[in-house]
Image (cartoon, coloured by chain):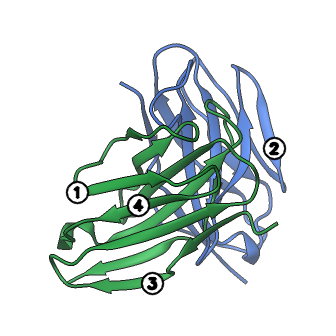
Amino acid sequence: GNSVTQMEGPVTLSEEAFLTINCTYTATGYPSLFWYVQYPGEGLQLLLKATKADDKGSNKGFEATYRKETTSFHLEKGSVQVSDSAVYFCALCPYGGSQGNLIFGKGTKLSVKP
Amino acid sequence: NAGVTQTPKFQVLKTGQSMTLQCAQDMNHNSMYWYRQDPGMGLRLIYYSASEGTTDKGEVPNGYNVSRLNKREFSLRLESAAPSQTSVYFCASSEAWGSYEQYFGPGTRLTVT
């Protein structure tokens, strides 16, 4: 079946540190991949996406590359800010869609200290 | 535009009580969804409505019912609440079935005692 596995948190970093949050997936066919972010007290927002192998999604300084050979979509940012403190969810949409389209990982909480 | 709105923001129920969670979107989206979020579990789909007039079960539909009242509104009903339904509930919408980007409401935090 389809599933998403992401690194367990919480992750605590100092401001300006480098961030990596690992995400790997299992899927049949060629899924699309996403990172969603949830700021405290809010709903989820789409952060970035990649729809085919080797695509790089980017937004707000965050990047993730769709790696089919390693079935991965790791989230990176070169210099985090306190305002990046949030929960980050990796998600996939199976090729051709299915119930509700999106399958989420369990989320990784990031705390950035000044 | 308000986007996706949900009411109430917080609710406490006793076991066996019923309630309806309301959701509305003003983006003229065709598809709407209800998720629950539990610690360490991520988001799990309860029900969805691919288009006005249709509803389907998601991953965890037991104990819930839904109504797509019109294109804007999609409600979730708990007929007889149980402590296992303590969770944060999110409504979401997307432009069309198969659209990748879903827009989420702020959530309803429900506690069942």
- SS at mark 4? strand
Query: Which residue in the structure is indicated by mark 3?
Result: B10
Closer to the eye: label 4 or 2: 4
Pointers 2 and 1 in contact (C-beta within 8 Å): no
Q: Colour of chain B?
A: green
Q: Residue at x 72, y 31 (%)?
A: A50
Query: Would you call the spot at circle 2 few (<14 residues within 10 Å), some (14-19), or many (20 or more)?
Result: some
**Contact flag, marks 3 and 2 (Cβ < 8 Å):** no
Residue type, label 1: Gly
Distance in Å between CA atoms under marks 2 and 1: 39 Å
The residue carrying mark 1 is: B63
Mark 4 is on which residue type? Leu
Place residue B86 in its image quadrant: bottom left
Q: Secondary structure at mark 1?
A: loop
Percent of width and height locating residue B103? 67, 54
**Type of amino acid at the residue the image marks with label 2:** Ser
Q: Colour of chain A?
A: blue
